[in-house]
Image (cartoon, rainbow, N blue to C red):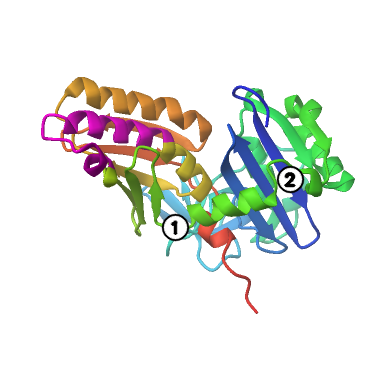
Amino acid sequence: MADGMGEEVFISLGPDRAELYRWANDRLVQAIAEREGESGPAGAIYYGRVTKVDRALNVAFVEIGLEKPGMLPLKSHSRLAEGDGAIVQVKRGVHEEKGVRLSHGNPADRRLAPMVEGRKPPFLMVPPPALWESALKMLAPERIAAIHCDRRADLERVLAWCRTHSPELSAKAAHRPRRDWEPNDAAATEEIAAALQEEVALPTGGHLLFEPVRTLTAIDVNSGSASERRGDDRGGMGETALSVNLAAAQEIPIQLALRNLGGVIVIDFIDIENRGKRDRVVEALRESVIVDPAIDWVGNMSRLGLVELKRRRSGPTLAEMWKPSAP
């Protein structure tokens, strides 16, 4: 592994399955797998047909050829009406029972304008990016020390993408066969298996419990054996709670990035009455989220020990990507 803050990315673009692994400080913080034909619609550009305009909600519903129409927030000056054609881009894929969320495409784009002439919507104009492309696009180039590509053909594809989307990464990409990867596949498999469990042990003796539900993800921080091992009385429990909470604040962003859990996240830290100590935990959490570019916002801690944060949804979860293949 690279020294300091440098992160390393390992990419294998096989004919049937593409994989990307990102390691930071000897920890796997991202693992992506995408089989041929499984890419979602996020990032795709369509020429859609407006089926309904709801002025009260200031949105239009646009048919783009998927099971349900997508929702397009309207601009203040928009004159879209039912039956109109519209160039739109999928900003967020299907989640739960909701349709995709759309944004306005750019009809002035020289690639797009000629494609709609004389054609009836809906139809696909620009296919969605692969998951590995979306992952690279989210990363801060200055934090990446190296990108290792399994095959020379993989390197050519990665370099072609870098030249267009992130030239700073071009000099960091090189061919390195998978058999020479370090950390190797066994290390990645071990970390993925651990991240597929609901419970995560902390080095302090406490643990985290991840409970994704339909509307949010709840994370419970528990002191577990930490308080038992130290034999804390009520006066000493504050220090135990602080140490477990600080360890949790460092671990949670890694777990969120690896598990790829999006939306609203609510963390139930161990109660701490001292406001200064509560602030230390939140500060540690905000420092730790640098490992996860998808985290947009971290709130303050309530007196009950609750902290909310918001993480962008970006593709399937780890559990969905690593589900067993159908026979």
* Residues drawn in magenta: 226-250
Is 217 on the left or on the right of 117, as rendered? left
Q: Amino acid at mark 1?
A: Gln
Residue 47 image position (x, y, % from top left) = 65, 54
Displayed quadrant of residue 176: top right
Is 235 on the left or on the right of 184, as rendered? left
- Tell whether position 239 is magenta: yes
Residue 85 disc label:
none
Q: Majority secondary structure of the magenta segment?
A: helix
Does dot 1 land on a helix, a strand or a loop?
loop
The outermost residue toward the left is: 234
Quarter of the image for the N terminus: give it: top right
Residue 197 disc label:
1
Query: Residue at (35%, 44%) from the top-left corner?
Result: 265
**Closer to the observer: label 2 or label 1?**
1
Residue in the foreground of this view, choosing between 174 and 86: 174
Residue 282 image position (x, y, % from top left) = 31, 28
Circle 2 sits on which residue?
A: 11
| Residue 177 visible here | yes
Residue in the foreground of this view, choosing between 67 and 8: 8
Residue 33 image position (x, y, % from top left) = 65, 55
| Residue 82 visible here | no
Q: Amino acid at mark 2?
A: Ile
The outermost residue toward the bottom is: 327
Evaluate if marks 2 and 1 touch, with contact meaning CB atoms under 8 Å apart. Answer: no
